[in-house]
Image (tube, coloured by chain):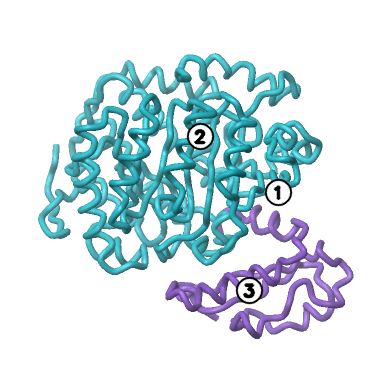
Chain colours: A purple, B cyan
Amino acid sequence: MAFEWLSKFEQGTEKEADYAEKKLAAYRLGMKGKGSIVGVMVHTAPDCCEPARQLPDKKVYHPDDAPSLPLSDCPQGRHCGCVYRPAMSYQDPVI
Amino acid sequence: MQSTLGVLARIPLFKLYRSFGWPQMLPVNLTLSPSPKCNSRCLTCNIWMKRENELTLEEWDKTLASLGKAPYWFTISGGEPLMFPHVVELAKLAYQHCKPGIINIPTNSILPNIPERVEQIARACPDSQLIINLSLDGVGEQHDRIRGVKGNFEKFEKRLGQLLDLRGRLKNLVVGIHSVVSVFSVGHLDEIIAYADGSGADQFITEIAEPRIELDTVGLPITPSAEEYARAIDRLIKYVESKQFKGMARVTEAMRIEYYKLVKRILDEKDQVIACYAGWVSAQIYADGTVWPCCVRADNLGNLRDHNYDFKTIWFGEKIKEVRRSIAAKECHCPLANASYTNMLHDLPTLGRVAGNLMRPKVPLGAISLPVKAESGQSSRDRIA
């Protein structure tokens, strides 16, 4: 994958208070708006908490059903490195 | 109105600023993103899904007033910038407060009122060059597929014709074609080049599809491999080198060739390659008033609403220092065109190569063949030079 630094950079960036709300609202709108988004995935951080580690790998959620990040008991709070990623129809496999 | 020479005179000062933090300078190259809303559904971009508490015109007015005459080059970006209801007023405000040399606006060509808005902006900003770049990612149905809108290519052709007509009446209007080279389009770049060549547009520019925080494309497989990109772009370079340009166009085309070569090196070396001046010379103001050094990292340097709309308090504040350290330490690298052209102007070896290219005789296309533009979006392979 090109520009891997950016993925790490994004994971290292402190989240806004409304991170989950805004991201999931965008994906919800995206799915209604006939784009190529098919859902949302959680990309966990290498040092993520145990509950995050238990999340199913590469699962595509509907935005209504995706876990809220950071997870409620995450000890890193808004510094949690887990992020949402849009799942696109052209990804292979789309999961 | 600001002159190009005035901008060039600031180069040594920006080099000092980046190295020593003095003299403090406001950015020359500023991107304004008034809204993320867009009526395209591009495979390479997810910005259209976002909704923001957008700055009002009054807020833009105060912000632009705080910048004075520093910005020379404005890009009004999006989303689809010409869909933003107040885009004409926004351009007017930028013109009134900052007197920029250039206002650059990309467009997806979809809305029928685009020519009307372009004419209004061009007439309201008579001493600025207005560059309108129409996006083209394929010829015919390929364009529609990548942009996610049926009939988009047809609209592109219609808007191009309308804008070229306008160009005949408006001296300060430049009409260009802009292509994003992605995994979806890299295989048919030749066809796009040939189409652009016969289109009558003033310029043809390309940019590689890359992940950006702004576009929510981090981690998506949209960037062609270094090898695929090099194969396609080498043909574009040969093509550009074979053309005869005059005056300023010769310089801009020579810069473009250097940019394409720079992108190849960035992909190959996974390094900044030349020093990045995002955060010193270039910046972006996002729809909600957040100031970024660039749209790739989109570091939150501060929100204008929290700083009484005074850009300077963010630009010369504390928060930006760590971001500048990170950029200077090469903790990031990317081929973002907007920043890269600025960076190239501040890189002496690049400027030397541009000067060398200007003195070199033109190279005939020789064995390079490109598909020639044909009717109805079809193409046929034939030699064009």
Identify the amino acid type marked 3.
Answer: Leu
Label 1 sits on a secondary structure element that is loop
For mark 1, name the chain.
Answer: B
Image spot of residue B377 (x, y percent): 17, 59
Q: B149 or B166: nearer the eye?
A: B166
Image quadrant in which you'd find residue B217: bottom right
In the image, is residue B274 above or below residue B181?
above
At label 2, counting other C-alpha atoms closer than 10 Å, the crowd grade (few under 14, some 14-19, many 20 or more) is many
Q: Do the CB atoms of the residues marked 1 and 3 lie less than 8 Å apart?
A: no
Identify the amino acid type marked 1.
Answer: Asn
Q: A77 or B131: nearer the eye?
A: B131
| Residue at left offset 58%, top offset 17% | B10
Quadrant of image for the C terminus of chain B? top left
- Answer whether residue B275 is visible to the viewer in this image: no
Left/right of residue B99 with respect to residue B330 in the rendered view:
left
Location of mark 1 (residue): B300
Label 3 sits on a secondary structure element that is helix
Left/right of residue B32 with respect to residue B233 in the rendered view:
right
In the image, is residue A28 above or below residue B289?
below
Disc 1 versus disc 2: distance between alpha carbons? Answer: 23 Å
| Residue at left offset 45%, top offset 53% | B84
